[in-house]
Amino acid sequence: MPENESLREIVKEKYPDGSVIIGATIAARSLGTKTGMILDREFGYVTPENDFKQTTIHPDPRTWNWRLADKWPQHIIENKQILRMHCPIGPQCSKWTKSDNRTAQELIVNEEEFLTEVCKRYNNKQGIEYMDVVNETVIDGKWHKNKPGNKKWECPWYIIGLDKDRNRTPLYIKKAFIIAEKYAPNLKFIYNHHEDPTKYKSWNLIKETISYLRNQGLRVDGIGWQAHVDNNWATKDNLNDLERLIRWAHANNLEFHVTEASVWLKHGHSKKDFEEQAFTYQAILKVLLKNHSTGRVGWNTWHVDDGHGWRRKLSPALFDAAYRPKPAYFAIRNALENN
């Protein structure tokens, strides 16, 4: 562990107004391990990996499993953290949901049951402040649809139906926000998405969808970008596109969160590669910090150490597999301290 003050202490000192939150993701199985110890020392904002997803909690119509999700409420109280529930209605749903013989009515019941029970169970839990309501609703500027036979990457909820607005917005999106507002009024609602800010058609459709939802009398509190990028991503043009998206969010009374920060090392693990990874992480965070005075910004890395988590061979974390801080960690520190 670094011997000086933690990232969360720097954030508390430098941004006492709460305009900046810095977090990380682990699974409940890592609580109490070295990975969990780093999480609790360094981050005041946490996002459980898959513990709140439908695949874990409600994998089929007869099964409810709250064991992993229920580990978090007491943990965040003890460690004075806030939490974002990653439980969105989107492509990462149960295998049952993705079966090609599901009917629209079955999916309506499935969506309502899952989201209602999650909201009711965690709405009043201290420290749980956010929930991802929907995720990955758009791809390449068009609605993300079901793909028969494709169980890995599809959005079966699309067959529930479409509204009559200009964009023919899928009804499952509106339904998700209706349920969230009814049963989780104390939480903030995030509209999460995975594509780069450079994907203008997709983000324009999301912007229009947020306006559509608000015109329906529904609440959207923030947008999230799943920033899974390569270590050469931080070009001037890409960073400018990111800043434009943040400014749009704040101008429309929306928080902006980088919900899943990853910088992949796809081309090697040399000293230069790790330095470029550090630069990429820092450049993205600096754009967020530059805009914290106009609205809240959040940054959440999807990894803690390279020995655990998703796509470990690409070494995306701030700490290495031996739990030592990498250049990326010190780049994040530097950005927070010197903004």
Image: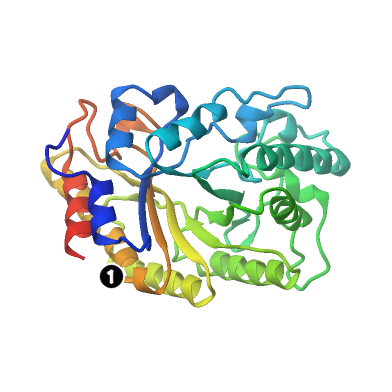
User: Quick one: quadrant of the N terminus?
Assistant: top left
Above or below for 188 versus 152: below
Q: Which residue is located at x 25 percent, y 41 percent?
A: 318
Apparent side of residue 244 relative to residue 117 in the rendered image (left or right): left
Q: Residues within 10 Å of mark 1 (few under 14, many from 20)?
A: few
Q: Quadrant of residue 280?
A: bottom left
Asked if residue 314 can be seen in this view, the reply is no
Apparent side of residue 231 relative to residue 189 in the rendered image (left or right): left
Residue pointed to by mark 1: 236
Helix, strand or loop at mark 1: helix
What x and y, as percent, mark residue 101?
83, 33
Above or below for 199 versus 55: below
Name, please, the residue furthest toward the bottom.
Answer: 251
Q: Which residue is located at x 73 percent, y 22 percent?
A: 63
Q: Quadrant of residue 69?
A: top right
What x and y, as percent, mark residue 195?
49, 56
What x and y, as percent, mark residue 331?
18, 52
Q: Which residue is located at x 61 percent, y 53 percent?
A: 186
Apparent side of residue 339 relative to residue 203 in the rendered image (left or right): left
Closer to the camera in the image, 172 or 72: 72
Q: What residue type is labelled 1?
A: Lys
What x and y, as percent, mark residue 298?
40, 56
